[in-house]
Image (cartoon, rainbow, N blue to C red):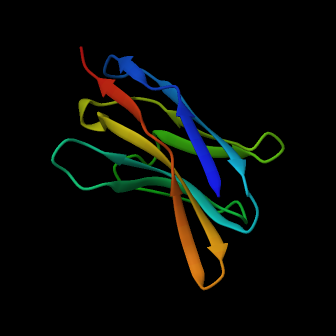
């Protein structure tokens, strides 16, 4: 099992910045990738940013150049630095781990942290 706990969400004005953190614990080995997803009301959950075990990163087109994903393997932490925030970034943000298990891949999720961008 993998436990994930997000923090760092909140209310910020348009153009502002926030940094989300995700603390991982438990069976944190054989990790394929870690990432951040978000879900706005009445919308599907979408990938925001992902970092693989080889440190390759990918981003949703809507956040490229504004968001940066990073990880601190020594502390089992993952971050999402969000700059130039827009109202359309408002959503619940979820930490995700994709882990290799017997028979395939399993996804683990945190409980989510709310980000609200509003003046």
Q: In the picture, which quadrant includes the N terminus?
A: bottom right
Viewer can see residue 119: yes
Q: Could you say where residue 59 lies in the image, as x and y percent from the top left?
A: 47, 55
Corner quadrant of residue 70: top right
Outermost residue toward the front in this view:
1
Residue 72 place in picture, x, y as percent? 75, 43
- Left or right: 118 with respect to 93? left
Residue 51, compared with residue 4, is above or below; it is: below
User: In the picture, which quadrant includes the C terminus?
Assistant: top left
Q: Is residue 111 above or below residue 57?
A: above
Identity of the residue furthest to the left in this view: 42
x%, y% of residue 60?
Answer: 40, 55
Q: Who's the residue at 45% across and 45% down the image?
A: 94
In this rendering, position of residue 20 left or right of residue 46: right
| Residue in the image at 57% along x and 38% along y | 5
The residue drawn where x is 55% and y is 70% is 106
Question: Does residue 80 appear in the picture of this structure?
Answer: no
Q: Please provide percent x and percent y for residue 83.
A: 46, 30
Q: To which quarter of the image does residue 112 belong?
A: top left
Vertical position of residue 98 compared to residue 74: above or below: below
Indicate whether 103 appears above or below 22.
below
């Amino acid at each position: 099992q993998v436990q994930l706990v997000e923090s760092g969400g909140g209310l910020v004005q348009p153009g502002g910045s926030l940094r989300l953190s995700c603390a991982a614990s438990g069976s944190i080995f054989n990790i394929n990738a870690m990432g951040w997803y978000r879900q706005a009301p009445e919308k599907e959950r979408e990938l925001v940013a992902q970092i693989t075990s080889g440190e390759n990163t990918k981003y949703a087109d809507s956040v490229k150049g504004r968001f940066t994903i990073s990880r601190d393997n020594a502390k089992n932490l993952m971050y999402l630095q969000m700059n130039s925030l827009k109202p359309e970034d408002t959503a619940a943000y979820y930490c995700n781990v994709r882990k290799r298990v017997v028979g395939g891949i399993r996804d683990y999720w945190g409980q989510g942290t709310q980000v609200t961008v509003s003046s």
